[in-house]
Structures are given as structure tokens and as C-alpha cells.
Amino acid sequence: MRAISLFSGIGGIDLAAEWAGIEVVLFVERDPFCQKVLNKHWPHVPIIDDIRKVTKELLLRMGVIGNGRTIDLIFGGYPCQGESGIGKRKGQEDERWLWPEMFRLIRELRPTWVLGENVDGHLTMGYNEVITNLEIEDYGTRTFVLPAVSVGAPHERYRVFIVGNASSQSKSQTDTSVGPVGGKRDTRKDSAWITRGTLSPSYWQIHQPPVPGVDDGIPDRVERSRAAGNAVVPQHVFPILQAIKLIHDQAA
């Protein structure tokens, strides 16, 4: 299963994808420091510094697609500053609202799977546009709102994960044991305890970062002061990517 990573940051989602057995074949990330982190850990994966430059034609020239090579999954945490509760909440009017560029690439490449990530403030700003865009393009969607504490992290860090699947009915859409946004099983109070304790407290103690307040599950020795605030906890998104990979393999 081959994926393109957008707004990659220091690779939190990418590390989870690697654990799930998904090959990331391209990063899109503009920050020079984050690029250095990505190059260190994935030295053979090319990086493009601006999503506006990424087109189907460019990917064909680069050899990322073509000659039997396809993209099965596009994922990315499109910038959240416009939706975050600590900002001015300009939403789609914020110059950093880059979902339209991610959607443009989805339309060009038509991957089987899409995974978007954002802060929970996204649910009241910009979310309807994302869901509408995907469903107009015949992607069935499922949204999960999960806190990092659900995988044992010592902080809430709620995140919205939007999964899109181009097939008519994926298991994520038909399995009633999976609680969607608005479902009876998906209250914040309950979701925080879904898998609490998956990782023992000692794990988080061992990987306690030198910078207070950024317990994000990223391995030690990663410089966090510039990038951790935007990073995705790998353990947070791993179950979703693992399920995508499993369903994708079963359908193959």
C-alpha cells in the first residue's frame, strides 16, 4: 500500500503508517527544520516544499506514479490555525486554510483512501466543506474524534480524523461497533476511556521529553520546541491506519 504524506511535519502520521505497513513515497512539507527530521529518518523519500506545486503531471515525471505504480492513500493534517480555539478562528478565510489544495490532489489522483487530521475545533469550522467535497467525489466518509489519552498518553489532545473510502461500503462504515461523530458511543467522556492503558504509564515516563508539556509519543532526542506542537501522536492515529491497511488488503 503506497501513500503520499501532506503537511508532514516531523512525521508523526508517517511513523504510524510505517508501523501499519504502509509505504510513504512522498512528503510535502515546507518547514526547513521538519524537512531535516524527515530526511534523517526517511532519507530515500523525496520532499516537495509546497503543496501547490504537486500535480499529477509532476508525480509522473518524478516516477512516483506510472508504470504500474499508484497511490492508494493520501493523508495529511492540513493546517489547523484557522480552526484552533486558541487562534482568531478565521476558518476558510485564513490564508493557511489549505484543504482545497489537498482536495485538488485527491481529485487528480483518486486514491482509494483519504485520511485528514485536524483539531477538534474543526468540527464547527471547515468540517462541512471537507465532508461535502469528499462525498461529492463519491468517497464514503467516517469521522472519529479521539483524545491522545485513549492510547495512554498523559494528556487529552483531542483530534479529528476524517477517513474517506472510494469503495461503496467499507467496514468502517458498516461496523456498528465503531462509533462515528454523533453516534451514541462517541461522547468525549466515553471516548477518552476506549483504550486507556494501551500503553503503560512507564512508556510515557521513559519517553518523557525535556520540554515540559509536550508528551506526544515522539521518540526521545527529537528536538521538540519548534515542531512538537503541530505533531500528531503516532500511537493516536496508528489504529486508524492499521484498520485502513487491513481493509485494503482484504479487498485486494
Image: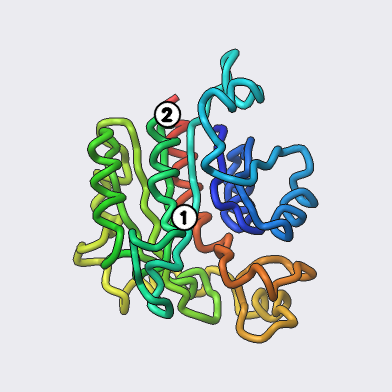
- Quadrant in the picture for the N terminus: top right
Residue type at the position of mark 1:
Tyr
Q: Which numbered disc flags the more N-terminal residue, 2 or 1?
A: 1
Q: Which residue is mark 1?
A: 78
Q: Quadrant of residue 134?
A: top left
**Which residue does the image show at 71% across and 39% down from the upper left?**
45
Q: How many marks?
A: 2
Q: State the scheme by which the image is colored.
A: rainbow
**Image vertical order of residue 14 relative to residue 208, above or below:** above
Q: Residue at x 61, y 58 (%)?
A: 12
Type of amino acid at the residue the image marks with label 2: Glu
Quadrant assignment for the C terminus: top left
Secondary structure under the numbered disc 1 in the rendered image: loop
Rendering coords of residue 235 (x, y %): 56, 62
- Mark 1, other Cα within 10 Å: few <14 / some 14–19 / many ≥20: many
Q: Is residue 178 left or right of residue 208?
A: left
In the picture, residue 53 is in which quadrant?
A: top right
* 60 left or right, relative to 244: right
Q: Secondary structure at mark 2?
A: helix
Residue visible at 31% across and 79% down?
189
Label at residue 53: none
Q: Nearer the viewer, residue 129 or 42?
A: 129
Residue positioned most to the bottom: 212
- Where 68 falls versus 188 (above or below)? above
Where is residue 120 drawn, in percent x and y? 36, 69
Label 2: how many Cα within 10 Å (few below 14, some 14–19, many 20+): few
Q: Which residue is mark 2?
A: 108
Please report contact status of discs 2 and 1: CB closer than 8 Å, yes or no.
no
Cα distance in 3D space between marks 2 and 1: 18 Å
Residue 52 lies, with reference to residue 97, above or below; the image says above
